Amino acid sequence: MTTRRLVLAAPALLLSTAARAQSQRTVRLVVPFPAGGATDGLARLWAPAFSQRIGLPVVVDNRPGAAGVPAADVVAKAAPDGLTLLLATSSIASTGPAVNPALPYDVERDFLPLSLLAVSPSLVLVSTTVPAQTLEEFIAWARARRGQVNYGSSGVGTGPHLAGALFDRLADTGMVHVPYRGTGPVYAELRRGDVHALMDVPSTAAPHLQGGTVRALAVTSPAPTPLAPGLRPAREAVPGFEAETWFGVYGPAGLPAATAAQYTTAASEAIRDPALTARLADLGAEVRGADGPALAAVARAEREKWTRLVRDLGIKPEG
Protein backbone atom coordinates (compact mmCIF):
# COMPACT_ATOMS: atom_id res chain seq x y z
CA MET A 1 0.00 0.00 0.00
CA THR A 2 2.82 2.36 0.88
CA THR A 3 4.55 1.65 -2.43
CA ARG A 4 1.30 2.26 -4.34
CA ARG A 5 0.84 5.62 -2.61
CA LEU A 6 4.36 6.67 -3.56
CA VAL A 7 3.81 5.68 -7.20
CA LEU A 8 0.54 7.62 -7.35
CA ALA A 9 2.11 10.64 -5.69
CA ALA A 10 5.07 10.80 -8.09
CA PRO A 11 3.22 12.38 -11.08
CA ALA A 12 1.71 15.02 -8.83
CA LEU A 13 5.14 15.76 -7.40
CA LEU A 14 6.61 16.09 -10.89
CA LEU A 15 3.82 18.43 -11.99
CA SER A 16 4.31 20.57 -8.90
CA THR A 17 8.07 20.77 -9.52
CA ALA A 18 7.54 21.71 -13.17
CA ALA A 19 5.02 24.40 -12.27
CA ARG A 20 7.38 25.82 -9.66
CA ALA A 21 10.27 25.84 -12.15
CA GLN A 22 8.10 27.63 -14.69
CA SER A 23 7.02 30.22 -12.13
CA GLN A 24 10.66 30.93 -11.27
CA ARG A 25 11.58 31.77 -14.88
CA THR A 26 12.12 35.51 -15.32
CA VAL A 27 12.87 37.40 -18.51
CA ARG A 28 15.67 39.94 -18.20
CA LEU A 29 15.21 42.95 -20.49
CA VAL A 30 18.64 44.54 -20.89
CA VAL A 31 18.52 48.31 -21.47
CA PRO A 32 21.84 49.87 -22.56
CA PHE A 33 21.07 53.24 -20.95
CA PRO A 34 20.68 54.51 -17.39
CA ALA A 35 17.41 54.66 -15.50
CA GLY A 36 15.39 57.81 -16.02
CA GLY A 37 16.01 58.31 -19.75
CA ALA A 38 13.58 57.90 -22.64
CA THR A 39 14.70 54.35 -23.50
CA ASP A 40 14.41 53.26 -19.87
CA GLY A 41 11.00 54.91 -19.64
CA LEU A 42 9.79 53.09 -22.74
CA ALA A 43 11.11 49.79 -21.37
CA ARG A 44 9.35 50.19 -18.03
CA LEU A 45 6.06 51.18 -19.61
CA TRP A 46 6.12 48.38 -22.17
CA ALA A 47 7.51 45.53 -20.04
CA PRO A 48 4.39 44.89 -17.89
CA ALA A 49 2.14 44.61 -20.95
CA PHE A 50 4.65 42.28 -22.61
CA SER A 51 4.99 40.24 -19.41
CA GLN A 52 1.24 39.77 -19.21
CA ARG A 53 1.13 38.39 -22.74
CA ILE A 54 4.00 35.91 -22.41
CA GLY A 55 3.03 34.77 -18.92
CA LEU A 56 6.45 35.41 -17.40
CA PRO A 57 7.77 38.21 -15.17
CA VAL A 58 10.01 40.72 -16.94
CA VAL A 59 12.66 42.74 -15.11
CA VAL A 60 14.48 45.73 -16.59
CA ASP A 61 18.27 45.44 -16.29
CA ASN A 62 19.95 48.82 -16.91
CA ARG A 63 23.53 48.45 -18.17
CA PRO A 64 24.67 51.89 -19.29
CA GLY A 65 28.06 52.89 -20.62
CA ALA A 66 30.41 52.57 -23.60
CA ALA A 67 27.71 53.47 -26.15
CA GLY A 68 25.69 50.40 -25.18
CA VAL A 69 28.28 47.91 -26.42
CA PRO A 70 28.71 45.94 -23.14
CA ALA A 71 24.93 45.67 -22.71
CA ALA A 72 24.44 44.39 -26.24
CA ASP A 73 27.33 41.97 -25.81
CA VAL A 74 25.61 40.43 -22.76
CA VAL A 75 22.60 39.57 -24.91
CA ALA A 76 24.67 38.45 -27.90
CA LYS A 77 26.40 35.89 -25.67
CA ALA A 78 23.34 34.87 -23.63
CA ALA A 79 21.77 31.42 -23.85
CA PRO A 80 18.98 31.41 -26.48
CA ASP A 81 16.38 30.33 -23.93
CA GLY A 82 14.09 33.34 -24.18
CA LEU A 83 15.12 34.69 -20.77
CA THR A 84 17.47 37.46 -21.97
CA LEU A 85 16.31 40.18 -24.36
CA LEU A 86 17.72 43.52 -25.49
CA LEU A 87 15.79 46.74 -25.86
CA ALA A 88 17.94 48.27 -28.59
CA THR A 89 17.94 51.65 -30.25
CA SER A 90 19.47 52.88 -33.49
CA SER A 91 22.76 53.39 -31.66
CA ILE A 92 23.12 49.64 -31.12
CA ALA A 93 22.34 48.24 -34.56
CA SER A 94 22.56 51.19 -36.97
CA THR A 95 24.64 54.25 -36.04
CA GLY A 96 26.95 52.38 -33.63
CA PRO A 97 28.22 49.80 -36.14
CA ALA A 98 28.48 52.54 -38.78
CA VAL A 99 30.85 54.58 -36.63
CA ASN A 100 32.68 51.69 -34.97
CA PRO A 101 32.69 48.45 -36.96
CA ALA A 102 35.16 46.86 -34.49
CA LEU A 103 32.49 45.51 -32.14
CA PRO A 104 32.65 42.29 -30.07
CA TYR A 105 29.56 41.02 -31.89
CA ASP A 106 28.04 41.02 -35.35
CA VAL A 107 24.67 42.76 -35.35
CA GLU A 108 23.38 40.60 -38.22
CA ARG A 109 24.72 37.25 -37.02
CA ASP A 110 24.49 37.39 -33.22
CA PHE A 111 21.00 38.81 -32.66
CA LEU A 112 17.48 37.84 -33.64
CA PRO A 113 15.21 40.85 -34.35
CA LEU A 114 11.83 40.33 -32.68
CA SER A 115 9.82 43.55 -32.92
CA LEU A 116 10.08 47.20 -33.90
CA LEU A 117 8.35 49.08 -31.08
CA ALA A 118 8.52 52.81 -31.74
CA VAL A 119 10.39 55.65 -33.41
CA SER A 120 11.40 59.10 -32.25
CA PRO A 121 12.21 61.98 -34.59
CA SER A 122 14.43 64.91 -33.73
CA LEU A 123 13.77 68.60 -34.01
CA VAL A 124 15.94 71.02 -35.94
CA LEU A 125 16.66 73.54 -33.20
CA VAL A 126 18.40 76.90 -33.41
CA SER A 127 19.46 79.42 -30.82
CA THR A 128 17.07 82.32 -30.39
CA THR A 129 20.07 84.55 -31.20
CA VAL A 130 19.84 83.21 -34.77
CA PRO A 131 17.57 85.55 -36.81
CA ALA A 132 16.04 82.77 -38.95
CA GLN A 133 12.36 82.00 -38.38
CA THR A 134 12.08 79.19 -40.94
CA LEU A 135 14.35 76.38 -42.05
CA GLU A 136 14.82 77.99 -45.45
CA GLU A 137 15.91 81.23 -43.77
CA PHE A 138 18.37 79.34 -41.55
CA ILE A 139 19.90 77.55 -44.53
CA ALA A 140 20.36 80.85 -46.37
CA TRP A 141 21.79 82.48 -43.22
CA ALA A 142 24.29 79.64 -42.69
CA ARG A 143 25.34 79.53 -46.35
CA ALA A 144 26.16 83.24 -46.18
CA ARG A 145 28.46 82.54 -43.20
CA ARG A 146 30.27 79.34 -44.18
CA GLY A 147 32.67 78.18 -41.52
CA GLN A 148 31.25 80.61 -38.96
CA VAL A 149 28.04 78.75 -38.12
CA ASN A 150 28.18 75.60 -36.00
CA TYR A 151 25.99 72.79 -34.72
CA GLY A 152 26.47 71.03 -31.42
CA SER A 153 26.07 67.38 -30.52
CA SER A 154 26.32 65.03 -27.56
CA GLY A 155 29.56 63.59 -28.93
CA VAL A 156 31.32 62.29 -32.02
CA GLY A 157 29.33 59.55 -33.73
CA THR A 158 26.16 60.11 -31.71
CA GLY A 159 22.73 60.47 -33.29
CA PRO A 160 22.72 64.29 -33.03
CA HIS A 161 26.16 64.43 -34.65
CA LEU A 162 25.23 62.19 -37.58
CA ALA A 163 21.88 63.93 -38.10
CA GLY A 164 23.59 67.32 -38.07
CA ALA A 165 26.30 66.11 -40.45
CA LEU A 166 23.73 64.71 -42.87
CA PHE A 167 21.71 67.92 -42.75
CA ASP A 168 24.84 70.03 -43.30
CA ARG A 169 25.86 67.90 -46.26
CA LEU A 170 22.47 67.85 -47.99
CA ALA A 171 21.66 71.50 -47.27
CA ASP A 172 25.21 72.61 -48.20
CA THR A 173 25.46 74.98 -45.24
CA GLY A 174 29.18 74.64 -44.46
CA MET A 175 28.59 74.36 -40.70
CA VAL A 176 31.23 73.30 -38.16
CA HIS A 177 30.57 70.40 -35.77
CA VAL A 178 31.18 71.08 -32.05
CA PRO A 179 30.95 67.90 -29.90
CA TYR A 180 30.13 67.95 -26.18
CA ARG A 181 29.66 65.29 -23.51
CA GLY A 182 25.87 65.12 -23.51
CA THR A 183 23.27 67.59 -24.71
CA GLY A 184 23.11 69.58 -21.45
CA PRO A 185 26.21 71.65 -22.26
CA VAL A 186 24.96 72.19 -25.82
CA TYR A 187 21.79 73.86 -24.54
CA ALA A 188 23.86 76.14 -22.31
CA GLU A 189 25.85 77.24 -25.36
CA LEU A 190 22.68 77.63 -27.44
CA ARG A 191 21.32 79.95 -24.77
CA ARG A 192 24.40 82.15 -25.06
CA GLY A 193 24.45 81.95 -28.84
CA ASP A 194 27.88 80.30 -28.95
CA VAL A 195 26.27 77.25 -30.61
CA HIS A 196 23.80 77.93 -33.39
CA ALA A 197 21.99 74.64 -34.06
CA LEU A 198 21.24 71.22 -32.60
CA MET A 199 19.27 68.12 -33.60
CA ASP A 200 17.52 66.73 -30.52
CA VAL A 201 14.47 64.68 -29.56
CA PRO A 202 11.25 66.48 -28.57
CA SER A 203 11.21 65.23 -24.97
CA THR A 204 14.63 66.71 -24.17
CA ALA A 205 14.02 69.87 -26.17
CA ALA A 206 10.62 70.60 -24.60
CA PRO A 207 11.73 72.53 -21.47
CA HIS A 208 14.16 74.64 -23.52
CA LEU A 209 11.45 75.43 -26.07
CA GLN A 210 9.09 76.37 -23.26
CA GLY A 211 11.80 78.50 -21.69
CA GLY A 212 12.27 80.39 -24.94
CA THR A 213 16.00 79.64 -25.25
CA VAL A 214 15.75 77.68 -28.51
CA ARG A 215 13.50 77.73 -31.55
CA ALA A 216 12.27 74.66 -33.45
CA LEU A 217 12.27 75.07 -37.22
CA ALA A 218 11.39 71.57 -38.45
CA VAL A 219 11.11 67.89 -37.56
CA THR A 220 13.42 65.21 -38.95
CA SER A 221 10.72 62.57 -39.56
CA PRO A 222 9.73 61.77 -43.16
CA ALA A 223 6.19 63.05 -42.53
CA PRO A 224 4.43 65.32 -40.03
CA THR A 225 4.16 63.73 -36.58
CA PRO A 226 1.92 64.35 -33.56
CA LEU A 227 5.10 64.44 -31.50
CA ALA A 228 5.93 67.81 -33.08
CA PRO A 229 2.60 69.47 -33.90
CA GLY A 230 2.77 72.31 -36.37
CA LEU A 231 6.30 71.57 -37.57
CA ARG A 232 7.04 70.68 -41.19
CA PRO A 233 9.37 67.81 -42.06
CA ALA A 234 12.83 69.18 -42.81
CA ARG A 235 12.95 67.14 -45.99
CA GLU A 236 10.50 69.61 -47.57
CA ALA A 237 13.35 72.14 -47.57
CA VAL A 238 16.21 69.61 -47.74
CA PRO A 239 15.25 66.71 -50.04
CA GLY A 240 16.45 63.34 -48.80
CA PHE A 241 17.01 64.46 -45.23
CA GLU A 242 15.42 62.41 -42.48
CA ALA A 243 16.73 61.05 -39.20
CA GLU A 244 14.77 59.03 -36.66
CA THR A 245 15.77 57.01 -33.63
CA TRP A 246 14.07 53.61 -33.52
CA PHE A 247 13.43 51.29 -30.56
CA GLY A 248 13.24 47.53 -30.99
CA VAL A 249 13.50 44.22 -29.16
CA TYR A 250 16.14 41.60 -29.94
CA GLY A 251 16.96 38.18 -28.60
CA PRO A 252 20.18 36.25 -29.01
CA ALA A 253 20.62 34.30 -32.22
CA GLY A 254 19.38 30.74 -31.98
CA LEU A 255 16.18 31.59 -30.13
CA PRO A 256 13.71 28.76 -30.88
CA ALA A 257 11.24 29.64 -33.62
CA ALA A 258 8.20 29.05 -31.42
CA THR A 259 9.53 31.33 -28.68
CA ALA A 260 10.49 33.99 -31.22
CA ALA A 261 7.02 33.91 -32.77
CA GLN A 262 5.35 34.15 -29.36
CA TYR A 263 7.55 37.07 -28.30
CA THR A 264 7.10 38.91 -31.60
CA THR A 265 3.31 38.76 -31.33
CA ALA A 266 3.34 39.71 -27.66
CA ALA A 267 5.76 42.60 -28.22
CA SER A 268 3.72 44.12 -31.04
CA GLU A 269 0.45 43.73 -29.16
CA ALA A 270 1.91 45.17 -25.96
CA ILE A 271 3.26 48.33 -27.59
CA ARG A 272 -0.12 48.93 -29.24
CA ASP A 273 -1.93 48.93 -25.89
CA PRO A 274 -4.02 52.15 -26.07
CA ALA A 275 -3.10 52.96 -22.49
CA LEU A 276 0.55 53.24 -23.52
CA THR A 277 0.21 55.48 -26.57
CA ALA A 278 -0.22 58.79 -24.76
CA ARG A 279 2.42 57.95 -22.15
CA LEU A 280 4.94 57.00 -24.81
CA ALA A 281 4.19 60.24 -26.66
CA ASP A 282 5.25 62.09 -23.51
CA LEU A 283 8.62 60.35 -23.88
CA GLY A 284 8.82 61.45 -27.51
CA ALA A 285 8.12 58.02 -28.98
CA GLU A 286 5.60 57.20 -31.72
CA VAL A 287 4.29 53.63 -31.69
CA ARG A 288 5.05 51.38 -34.68
CA GLY A 289 4.54 47.78 -33.50
CA ALA A 290 6.04 45.85 -36.43
CA ASP A 291 7.53 42.35 -36.63
CA GLY A 292 11.11 41.09 -36.61
CA PRO A 293 11.71 41.27 -40.38
CA ALA A 294 10.49 44.89 -40.36
CA LEU A 295 12.92 45.71 -37.56
CA ALA A 296 15.75 43.98 -39.44
CA ALA A 297 14.95 45.95 -42.59
CA VAL A 298 14.86 49.30 -40.77
CA ALA A 299 18.10 48.60 -38.90
CA ARG A 300 19.90 47.46 -42.06
CA ALA A 301 18.75 50.41 -44.18
CA GLU A 302 19.72 52.88 -41.46
CA ARG A 303 23.07 51.19 -40.92
CA GLU A 304 23.89 51.38 -44.63
CA LYS A 305 22.88 55.04 -44.80
CA TRP A 306 24.99 56.08 -41.81
CA THR A 307 27.93 53.90 -42.89
CA ARG A 308 28.08 55.78 -46.20
CA LEU A 309 28.00 59.13 -44.41
CA VAL A 310 30.67 58.11 -41.88
CA ARG A 311 32.93 56.81 -44.65
CA ASP A 312 32.47 59.85 -46.88
CA LEU A 313 33.11 62.35 -44.06
CA GLY A 314 35.86 60.34 -42.40
CA ILE A 315 34.14 60.28 -39.00
CA LYS A 316 36.12 58.25 -36.44
CA PRO A 317 34.95 56.98 -33.04
CA GLU A 318 36.25 58.85 -30.01
CA GLY A 319 39.01 57.16 -28.04
Image (tube, rainbow, N blue to C red):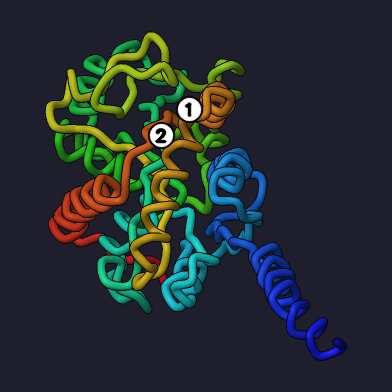
Q: Name which residue lies at 30% across and 40% down.
A: 164
User: Which dot marks residue 120?
Assistant: 2
Q: Nearer the viewer, residue 223 or 296?
A: 296
For label 1, the crowd category at 10 Å Cα-Cα, with few meaning under 14, some 14 to 19 and many 20 or more, is: many
Q: Residue furthest bottom?
A: 3
Q: What distance separates the C-alpha of mark 1 from that of mark 2?
A: 8 Å
Up the image or down, 185 lies above or below 27; here it is above
Camera-near label (1 vs 2) is: 2
User: Which dot marks residue 156?
Assistant: none
| Mark 1 or mark 2: whose residue is earlier in sequence | 2
x, y percentage for residue 220? 30, 29
Residue type at the position of mark 2: Ser
Q: Quadrant of the C terminus?
A: bottom left
Q: Judge left or right: residue 119 versus residue 53.
A: left
Label 2: state its secondary structure. Answer: strand
Residue type at the position of mark 1: Pro
Q: Name which residue lies at 41% across and 12% down.
A: 229
Q: Is residue 270 visible?
A: yes
Write down the quadrant of residue 69 in the picture.
bottom left
Label 1: state its secondary structure. Answer: helix
> CB atoms at circles 1 and 2 under 8 Å apart?
yes
User: Which dot marks residue 202?
Assistant: 1
For label 2, the crowd category at 10 Å Cα-Cα, with few meaning under 14, some 14 to 19 and many 20 or more, is: many
